[in-house]
Image (cartoon, rainbow, N blue to C red):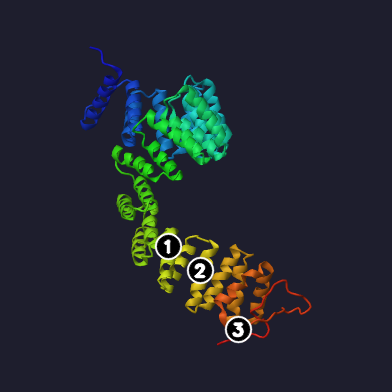
Amino acid sequence: MQLSPNEHNDFSLSKFESMLKTNDVYFFDSEEFENIIQYYLENGKIALAKKATKMGLEQHPSSTNLKLFQVEMHIFENELDTAEILLDEIYILEKSNEEVYIQKANICSRRDKHNKAIKLLEKALSITDDQADVLSLLGMEYLFIEDFENAKYYFMKCLEQDDSDYTALYNIIYCFEYLEQHEAAIDYLNIFLNKNPYSEVGWHQVGKQYYILKQYQKALAAFDFAVISDDRFIGAYLEKGKTLEKLGRYQQAIDCYSITLGLDDPTSFALLRIGKCHERLGHLDKALQFYNKCVEEDGLLDKGWIAITDFYFRQKNYQKALYYIDKAINIDSENVLYWKRYAKINNRLNLFEEAEHGYRRALELGNYEQDTWLVRCDILLQLGENQAAVNNLFQAAEFYPESPEIEFRLAGLFFTLNEPCKAEFHLKNGLDLDPDFTIVIEELFPRFTTGIQSSKLSDPTKSLPYNFATFEVYSIVYAG
């Protein structure tokens, strides 16, 4: 009885693995070894693939395909020089073998020589009978050098050869999106869908483009077609839910997200969105229930911890908000969004030292928004840390050199530190930038108010383009 190809491969694999467990040595033809190696590579069993390659070459030392597998192993382990030497030996014998050019291109790509890799792949494309894999590799090389037009072209060629190659389709849409060609992406997908009207992936991608363009009704229709094409397509339900949220149809969005919970294990994203929808509908207990489920499902999802913290913050339950943001920080102490909330909550609780620590950590983690610098400065003032506040503002000024809010704060601080020349310098800068922000000094440094009196700076001949009615630069009345 003749074995089918699959049965034959299974038999060869079982025979090979049986041989590894004994001291027996069995003979395999080179094609059997190739199938065994390919199986192990596809299943990520690299050590077994290497062992099969070694044994294969011992039995068939002249097999080019087995030598090419050996090259692939060396490339995988980043032994590029060794792989290149072996390829050069194979090239002398087989200059028309496309796999030689593909592996040479692989080495060039690993060395970031993508243009050279492209030329080698073009050579491989000209001699191969199976162009799909080479076209895909060319598309990837163009992606590496951010030539999205050429990348798009080659992935389109892939899809022409195999309209079920959804990896190529995703890459095509990625290129369209990077180039912000959303209408062109829709036109391309419509052509694709005319040929493949039941492609759930095609409808899903059309919907995403309409969603980006804020054409939510069209997006919703596309996601409906995706669900009709495959009623277990979780991605389509999730995108449909997001679209329904944008349309303010929160209960329908909840129903959509809930379907995904029954199709597979619950996702933290779906649980989070259900919670958000319930909160929008005023179902606060249910919202809180789903936020808790979200963080239980995925403790690393920062959006979950942020949602539950913000929920309590909006309810003005600052102690509960602080409790949850503390838990989040214990899980990920490098998350700047956590520290910003930690600082904000402590500030509301008048715990200024903790609030200052939170804003300082946010700055250390790269959050250089102007408000972060300004609020930290104001807290340092509350703590009487005037010099630290000055240092903080000088750092802020490096990022925001033309900020009147920074300049007026510096003016007030230098008044406080009894350095009138520096105070006058920053006061003038602030007035030149925007005199309306003199309110900063009124609110933060009320000790320097003197009633209603106009003032001039050092140059008495220069009239001031502002109504600075509450301060006098020269005759400061220090209410200390």
Q: Where is residue 65 in the image (x, y as percent from the top left)?
A: 41, 24
| Residue 2: % across, % down | 25, 13
Give the mark, 1 or 2, whose residue is nearer the N terminus.
Answer: 1
Upstream in the sequence, badge 2 or badge 3? 2
The image position of residue 319, as x and y in percent, is 35, 67
Q: Nearer the viewer, residue 60 or 387?
A: 387
- Which residue is the site of mark 3? 418
Q: What element carries label 1?
A: helix
Q: In this view, does 356 lie above or below 126?
A: below
Q: How far apart are marks 2 and 3 (CA)?
A: 23 Å
Q: Residues within 10 Å of mark 1 (few under 14, many from 20)?
A: many
Residue farthest along the left direction in this orientation: 22
Residue 398: quadrant of the picture: bottom right
Q: Which amino acid does label 2 sit on?
A: Val
Counting residues from the N terminus, which is met first, the one under dot 3 or under dot 1? 1
Q: Does 251 sit left or right of 150 as displayed?
A: left
**Crowd class of label 3 (few under 14; some 14 to 19; many from 20; radius 10 Å):** few
Q: To which quarter of the image does residue 347 belong?
A: bottom left
- Check disc 1 and give the amino acid type: Arg
The residue depicted at 67 percent of the width and 71 percent of the height is 431
The residue where tag 1 is placed is 341
In terms of secondary structure, where does tag 2 sit?
A: helix
